[in-house]
Amino acid sequence: MRNRRVLLPGLALLLLLPGCSAANGAAAEPVEPPEEGEMAEGVTVDGVGRVTGVPDVLRATIGVEVRRPAVQEALDAANAGAERVLAALRDAGVEERDVQTRDLAVYPEHHSPAPDAPPEISGYVVVNLVEAKLRELDRVGELLDAVLRAGGDDARLNGVAFALEDNAELLEAARDAAFADARAKAEQYARLAGGSLGPLVRLVEADAATPMAHEYETDDAMAAARQDVPIAPGEQEVQVRATATWRLE
């Protein structure tokens, strides 16, 4: 007659029926019990909290782009134009800590004198752009117009973007909302499982996200600034995602 094995959680037994012996005389090896907490029952959910606020700064990438036949001539013209742009920013009340060089480049331009001829250098381009944080949003159109006029025909505005720099209170509110969302989901699952929610055993927050509210690229930004058109900041969303685990009782 064959041997029969009966497995119980955490224990392995070899039952021998009368008149039978273990195969090869080997004893059964016990199954290791699970680690403490390994089999613990629980529920893990994601919670999302979203709150909105009005942007408090506008970042503008602004400066000059100069084309001249000689490299030194291009450098001199670009330096002079950049100084006028920086002076206009200072005159508008923009602090030095809010102005940072974003792009500085010097490169040749080429053209082919004939279809089959090799390209030749036709001139040089110098680009000098800074990123300026503008905090007086009600004066954005006026300020950009003044800076671009100071830069003259070589002035460039390569885009603007609203941002929410002081978002500590919004993040706190978003965390409250994310935790409440996670707990509500966990309580629902506990009811569906016929139990109740026990203590919280794990909580992990993912990276908080603050998307840009509005962004204008070069052509639109230049048009808005030149015409002193008001740019609406709208609202910006702050989002927090958290993963939480509760025991089930």
Image (tube, rainbow, N blue to C red):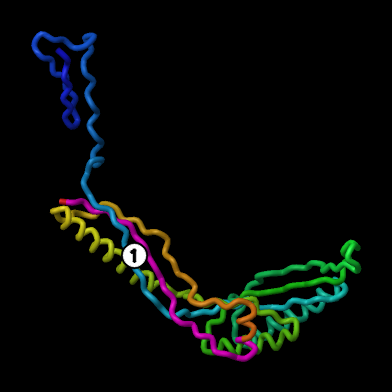
Name the residue at 53% across, 86% down.
Answer: 231
Percent across and percent down for residue 146 are 65, 89
- Of all residues shown, which one is farthest toward the left? 18
Helix, strand or loop for disc 1:
strand
Closest to the observer: 145 or 189? 189
Above-or-below relation of 225 to 4: below
Q: Is residue 132 visible?
A: no
The kind of residue tagged 1 is Val
Segment tinted magenta in the rendering: 224-248
How many dots with numbers? 1
Q: What is the x, y in percent for residue 167? A: 42, 73
Q: Magenta stretch containing residue 168, yes or no?
A: no
User: Label 1: how many residues lie within 10 Å, few (<14), some (14-19) or many (20+)?
Assistant: many
Residue 90 sits in which quadrant?
Answer: bottom right
Residue 154 can be seen in this image: yes
97 lies left or right of 26: right
- In this view, the residue farthest toward the front is 115
Q: Is residue 216 above or below residue 182?
A: below
Give the residue displayed 30% in from the left and 68% down from the top.
177
Classify 36 as above or below 31. below
Rendering coords of residue 178 (x, y %): 31, 65
User: Residue 147 at what x, y percent from top left?
Assistant: 66, 86
Q: Residue at x 62, y 91 (%)?
A: 227
Is residue 225 within the magenta segment? yes
Please state which of residues 168 and 184 is positioned toward the viewer in this rendering. Answer: 184
Q: Which residue is mark 1?
A: 48
Query: Residue 15 falls in which quadrant of the image?
Result: top left
- The part of the image, by quadrant, that contains residue 37 is top left
